[in-house]
Amino acid sequence: MNKFVVRQSLILFMAATVWGVAFVAQSVGMDYVGPYTFIAVRNIVALAVLIPCAIFMNKGRKKRDTEACHQKENKKALVIGGICCGICLFTASTLQQFGVKYTTVGKAGFITAMYLVLVPVFGIFLKKKTGLKVWIAVALASLGLYLLCITKGDFQLQKGDIYMLGCAAVFAVHILVVDHFSPLVDGVKLSCVQTFTNVVLGGIMMLLLEQPHLSDIFAAWLPIVYAGALSSGVGYTFQIIGQKGMNPTAACLILSLESVISVLAGWLLLHQTLTTRELLGCVLAFAAIILVQLPERK
């Protein structure tokens, strides 16, 4: 393994670590502010990080005549795509924010990661080919989720697990929406519009359903800044840098470690533990995540 691959792998692992620990930040933040307040303020911080990134990346680019001809069309795709992505991400973030309130950080990380299994399944509705490997992964994921979520033997999902399953489903839709719009527009600009949409939606819901106080927001400044600046800003940047020149399958496998890190973070920082049954569920779920990302045999 050459130095370049090692370096890129470490950068991707750092992104996975940032995202895994973000579940702890979300859980702790809920001790001070409501879910919509956390989402709104977190995305304001994220926007403050992303806008300079977009300006920096756009600076020095040479404008071509062909680009000028399609400027109006690209702007339209950017606005529509950013709003669609933002609505999906806001819905998923809301479900996730409510979910971490009622379940452990480790379970939240693994159930959220199920979107990687759901993406190819949802792709069937877009007439995308799905092989046997995906269905084996779905079976493994289903068994893993059963062990992880149905812990009392009464076949009833806990409130937090239901939120997280909904979150995983909406994240899968979000990936497909991003996949549709990202080839048409600049990725960082799309992320900025998406984040701004989250700020607007989060702000509206915050004012309608919650009573935010500046003192509470300042009390939660550390988890909010972590979730906004590091998870959305630094994590996103590390992903872009780390994936450059890397095998896509290897990159996805490293980023999948986010779910494992969430368990470790919950254990180390919040002293949350999982039972043997739940850990076995995590193992099966992680096996499904890895299987679904392996390339098809030709």
Image (cartoon, grey):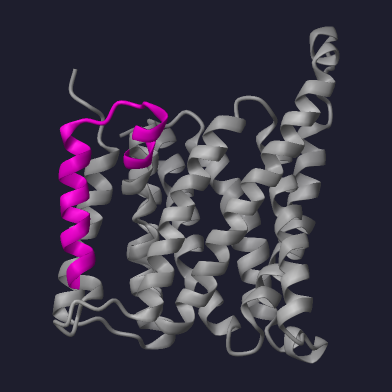
- Name the residue: 79% across, 48% down: 51
Q: Position of residue 275 (x, y in %)?
A: 19, 82
Name of the residue lying farthest toward the top: 65
* Residue 90, visible in the rendered structure: yes
- Name the residue: 62% across, 59% down: 90
- In the figure, residue 182 lies in which quadrant? top right
Which of the pair 61/217 is nearer the observer?
Answer: 217
- Image position of 67 (left or right of 185): right
Q: Is residue 201 above or below residue 256?
A: below
Quarter of the N terminus within the rendering: top left
Q: What's the magenta bit mostly, secondary-structure-wise?
A: helix
- Image position of 154 (left or right of 162): left
Q: Position of residue 177 (x, y in %)?
A: 55, 39
Residues drawn in magenta = 121-147
Q: Is residue 98 magenta?
A: no
- Image position of 209 (left or right of 112): right
